[in-house]
Amino acid sequence: MAYDGDVSLFQRIIAPAVQPLAESRAQHVIRTARALIADEAHWRRGDFVGFDVDGQPSYCLVGALRFAHSGNARRAGTAGASKFVARAVRERARVGIQEFNDGCAPHEEILAVLDRAYELAA
């Protein structure tokens, strides 16, 4: 079959399913952390991780980053992702990541910070 110049199949089906070719480790951690707390029921304030009555985990912003990096919300380390999150937080408020999560930011703003941090990590 000769190529007829139609790229619509690629644009409709293949392109949306393709992940970025060069996602950094920090970006991967940020994207995974965002997925962990995308549902507000899985986001918390005041502790890195907690569990509801059904045993479902919820994470604070730092806990989600740590879990995305190492599988343990209480183990330090974020593969450099926290520095991008800190920059995104400072663009919005003059506080640190934990103060932002625990005190002044609604869930939607937490997700917006993660989106901005992903961009900064590119």
Image (tube, helix red, strand yellow):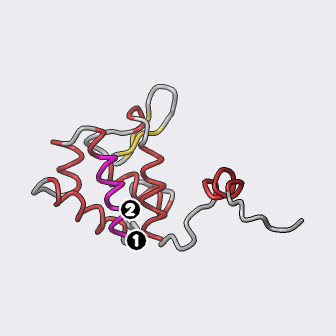
Whether residue 24 is situated above or below residue 41 in the rendered picture:
below
Which residue occupies 39% across, 56% down? 74
Marks 1,2: beta carbons within 8 A: yes
What's the residue type where badge 1 is placed?
Answer: Ala
Residue 91 on image: x %, y %? 17, 59
State which quadrant residue 76 falls in.
bottom left
Q: Is residue 19 magenta?
A: no
The residue that disc 2 covers is 118
Q: Tag 1's secondary structure?
A: loop
User: Which span of residues is magenta-colored?
Assistant: 110-122
Point out the residue furthest to the top here.
53
Looking at the rendered image, the quarter that the N terminus falls into is bottom right
Q: What percent of the width, then of the height, locates residue 26?
A: 42, 69
Residue placed at 44% from the left, 30% from the top? 52
The quadrant the C terminus occupies is bottom left
Residue 69 rendering spot, x and y as whole percentages: 47, 63
What crowding class fits label 1: few (fewer than 14 Cα within 10 Å), some (14-19), or many (20 or more)?
Answer: few
The prevailing secondary structure element of the residues shown in magenta is helix
In screen coordinates, is 65 left or right of 97?
A: right
Identified at 51% across, 32% down, the residue is 55
Q: Which residue is mark 1?
A: 122
Report the amino acid beneath label 2: Tyr
